[in-house]
Image (cartoon, helix red, strand yellow):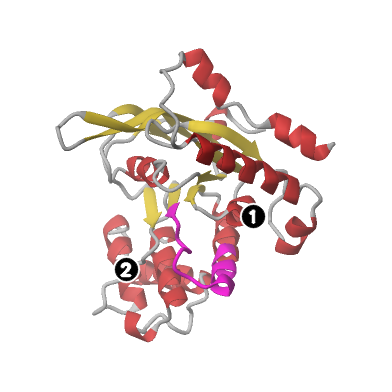
């Protein structure tokens, strides 16, 4: 049986972010974003460019101040950045004068400063091996391909043993084959480590393959959760089985239809603010779409 704390491991409550325009007036980019995540769950955020996906992620990471609302992780409200939330960005941003293992050790040395040098080194070696870099951990970034550099970035984040992993389009700069390889690398680690994960992506197929739920965001400004789509695929994931599942293309069609509808609304006047009850109704799982798909 799963405890209540496991079911509500991550709680994002009415997250909002406003930036000043050229006149100094606040413009709300994200407005009342609500989401509850289970421990070990992977949730993907998807939506059109500029809808605020990365804004939500950086607020959760503590890298972007929250205008309103709160983030609760494992029963505690979090403020600012911390090692309990690790981020992997599109670019790995490795220090070029350090080897792969030295880049990973930067964070490990700070988070596990109570451990011996040997213990910290073993942590780094373990996670570099987990991402497939056992034979390249003493190479410098200039000696590594783009995909290998991103593997270092993933190892650096996972080695901190965070409570939550935040992935901001981590495969956006990679070719299709490398992208698929790294998707499987991350999923294998997440299945083993049970880390709650938020994935920001523009790729519909990536969202379906990697996530347990997909959070579809409305078009900004004042973006929020439009629909939440539950995915029925068991873990661990096998790509061929997911692609051959008869529900796959129905789910994909549901996502594409939502994005197309948001595209049509892009140039319409912003609607009047809704009541809290209406907001909660909007964020109900897209059970109708699933029922239609199953029929």
Range shown magenta: 167-183
Query: Disc 1 marks which residue?
Result: 209
- The circle drawn on residue 181 is none
Q: How many marks?
A: 2
In front of the other: 76 or 196 = 196
Is 177 contained in the magenta span? yes
In front of the other: 142 or 291 = 291
Place of residue 75 in the rendered image (x, y in percent of width and height, measured from the top left): 42, 30
In front of the other: 213 or 140 = 213
Q: Is residue 253 left or right of residue 221?
A: right
- Which type of secondary structure does the marked residue at label 2 adopt? helix
Q: Dot 2, how many residues are within 10 Å of its Cα: few (below 14), some (14-19), or many (20+)?
A: many
Vertical placement of residue 14 versus 101, above or below: above
Place of residue 49 in the rendered image (x, y in percent of width and height, measured from the top left): 43, 48
Q: Dot 1, how many residues are within 10 Å of its Cα: few (below 14), some (14-19), or many (20+)?
A: many
Place of residue 136 in the rendered image (x, y in percent of width and height, measured from the top left): 43, 83
Is 280 contained in the magenta span? no
CA–CA distance in space, label 2 to label 1: 31 Å
Identity of the residue drawn at 41% across and 27% down: 269
On the question of residue 34 being in view, the answer is yes
Query: Disc 2 marks which residue?
Result: 105
| Residue 232: quarter of image | top right
In front of the other: 115 or 150 = 150
Identity of the residue drawn at 36% across and 67% down: 92
On the question of residue 140 being in view, the answer is no
The image quadrant where one finds the N terminus is: top right
């Amino acid at each position: 049986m799963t405890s209540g704390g496991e079911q509500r491991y991550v709680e994002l409550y009415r997250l909002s972010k406003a930036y000043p325009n050229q006149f100094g007036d606040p413009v709300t980019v994200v407005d009342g974003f609500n989401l509850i995540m289970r421990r070990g769950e992977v949730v993907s955020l998807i939506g059109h460019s500029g809808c605020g996906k990365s804004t939500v992620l950086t607020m959760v990471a503590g890298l972007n101040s929250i205008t309103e609302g709160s983030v609760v992780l494992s029963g505690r409200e979090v403020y600012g950045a911390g090692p309990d939330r690790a981020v992997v960005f599109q670019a790995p941003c490795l220090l070029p004068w350090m080897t792969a293992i030295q880049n990973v050790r930067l964070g490990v040395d700070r988070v596990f400063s109570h451990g011996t040098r040997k213990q910290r080194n073993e942590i780094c070696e373990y996670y570099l091996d987990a991402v497939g870099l056992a034979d390249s951990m003493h190479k410098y970034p200039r000696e590594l391909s783009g995909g290998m550099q991103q593997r270092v970035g993933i190892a650096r984040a996972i080695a901190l043993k965070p409570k939550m992993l935040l992935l901001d389009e981590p495969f956006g700069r990679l070719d299709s084959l490398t992208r698929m390889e790294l998707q499987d690398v991350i999923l294998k680690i997440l299945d083993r480590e049970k880390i709650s994960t938020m994935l920001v992506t523009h790729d519909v197929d990536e969202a379906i393959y990697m996530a347990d739920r997909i959070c579809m965001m409305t078009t900004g400004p004042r973006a929020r959760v439009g629909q939440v789509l539950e995915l029925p695929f068991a873990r661990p994931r096998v790509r061929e089985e997911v692609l051959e599942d008869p529900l796959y293309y129905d789910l994909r069609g549901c996502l594409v239809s939502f994005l197309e509808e948001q595209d049509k609304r892009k140039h319409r006047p912003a609607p009047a603010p809704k009541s809290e009850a209406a907001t909660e109704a909007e964020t109900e799982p897209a059970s109708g779409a699933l029922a239609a798909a199953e029929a």
